[in-house]
Amino acid sequence: MTKKLYIKTFGCQMNEYDTERIISAFEMMGYGMTDDPSEADFAIINTCSVREKPSEKVKSEIGRLKKYKKDNPNFKIGVAGCVAQQEGEAILDSNSYVDMVLGTDGIPRIGEVVERVENGERIAVTEFSSDNFTIPNFSRNRSVSAFVTIMKGCDNFCSYCIVPYVRGREKSRKSIEILDEVKYLVDNGVKEVTFLGQNVNSYGKNLDENINFTQFLYMATKIDGLERIRFVTSHPKDFSGELVDLISSEEKICEYLHLPLQAGSDSVLKKMNRGYSYSEYFEKVSMAKEKIKNIAISSDFIVGFPGEKDDDFLKTLDAIKEIEYETIFAFKYSPRPGTKASDIEDDVSEIVKSQRLKKLLDEQEKITSRLLKSQIGEIQEVMVEGISKKDNKVFSGRNRRNRIVNFVSSKVLKAGDIVNVKILEAKKNSLYGEKI
Ligand code: 5AD
Ligand code: SF4
């Protein structure tokens, strides 16, 4: 009988991409996949440590999986991702039922490591930078939209952020390797790629070739059969007019920009070590909105950063109103061990953090609702991603602004088809329409 892998992914798209590579590696070893851990022979939790909660979640997740060892003594448990990278051996020491700890750079070694684990060893792999993305030929033909990592790590050292410590220094992949990967994906049915990096717009720094992010994107637009290009995450300080011009002139690049502001107050931004003031950020966003027709902008925010006063928080509220994001992701500040900010007293109480988070999200709900309603009547380009399980005339996809659009079509469509949809209704977080 084929062995089966169960994998659960937390955190960002980078982790989703790593999950895909782990799956490919297991498929090469003859494993099939399962969504049900009770059927699995190997279970992996791909972890995130960017905020406190995810790392707690991991502990409970391990607790949930350990019972399967009773029925199947060969059932193996692996912890991958950022918590694995950070805690390494310690996870093996404190959890006797964990068999494998695989840090973020350990994926290329997974074949060898899994074989040893299957033979009863317990192993932790946490060395940095052996990962040159050499796992080839992903078997990812299950989807028309794929993530592709173009750079990893971060050199920015925002004072609250653990990423530079866990994922290490910025390292870009050679453009030819990435483009080959995209071509391979396109040959296997992918129509849309999202280029990933903690800080995509510093792509190319430290590479032998002379290339920057805009030049790289331009090369990607030339790939035949690739219909849509997206990218996350852009850092405001490196966000350039050159990139805005490329987005506005290249049909394949979608009008969607995730540009995390984090806070509206200059003094908080300074303590966060973000490298820009609110007015500098606002200038860049305004330029993007002006030059790129119909662009949707999204952002991340942290509330309750040490020293954040009511006044500071009000500036964050003002910022979301002024900028009118289509979506925001907001989090309560949580000190991460080893970061600069964790040396400062975490002086905003949990209650105040929760109140600020709620206020921010409530305000954003109104903005999102207004922006979505204003799109009623528009004809939007939607790429089909799926068919409703309940009704075979209802399809689901995303518009160019990265918004989910559900729509009716009397014509049968398949994933990857790009159609025009008239928007009839705005739901809380999605749009509804009909194919024209
Ligand atoms: N506390 C709360 N939120 C954080 N983020 C990163 N580090 C922390 C932290 N220590 C948020 C930021 C970032 C997103 C991925 O997670 O908003 O953009
Ligand atoms: Fe963390 Fe800042 Fe780097 Fe983003 S840019 S990964 S928030 S250090």
Image (tube, rainbow, N blue to C red):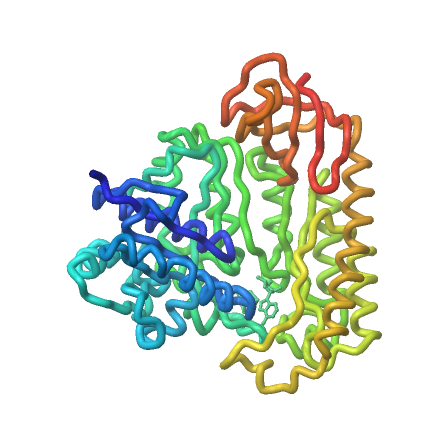
Apparent side of residue 399 relative to residue 349 in the rendered image (left or right): left
Q: Residue 77: image x %, image y %? A: 32, 59
For the C terminus, the quadrant is top right
Apparent side of residue 406 relative to residue 227 in the rendered image (left or right): right
Q: Residue 217: image x %, image y %? A: 50, 45
- Closer to the camera, 300 or 96? 96
Q: Is residue 295 above or below residue 209?
A: above
Q: Residue 430: image x %, image y %? A: 69, 37
- Closer to the camera, 78 or 294? 78
Q: Please tell me which residue is depicted at 74% across the width and 41% down the height of the picture.
A: 428
Q: Please tell me which residue is depicted at 79% across the width and 30% down the height of the picture.
A: 376
Quadrant for residue 166, please give it. bottom left
Q: Please tell me which residue is depicted at 76% across the width and 71% down the height of the picture.
A: 265
Residue 177 can be seen in this image: no
Q: Please tell me which residue is depicted at 22% across the width and 55% down the height of the picture.
A: 74
For the N terminus, the quadrant is top left
In the rendered image, the residue lying farthest to the top is: 411
Quadrant for residue 260, please give it. bottom right
Q: Residue 210: image x %, image y %? A: 41, 56
Ligand 1's quadrant: bottom right
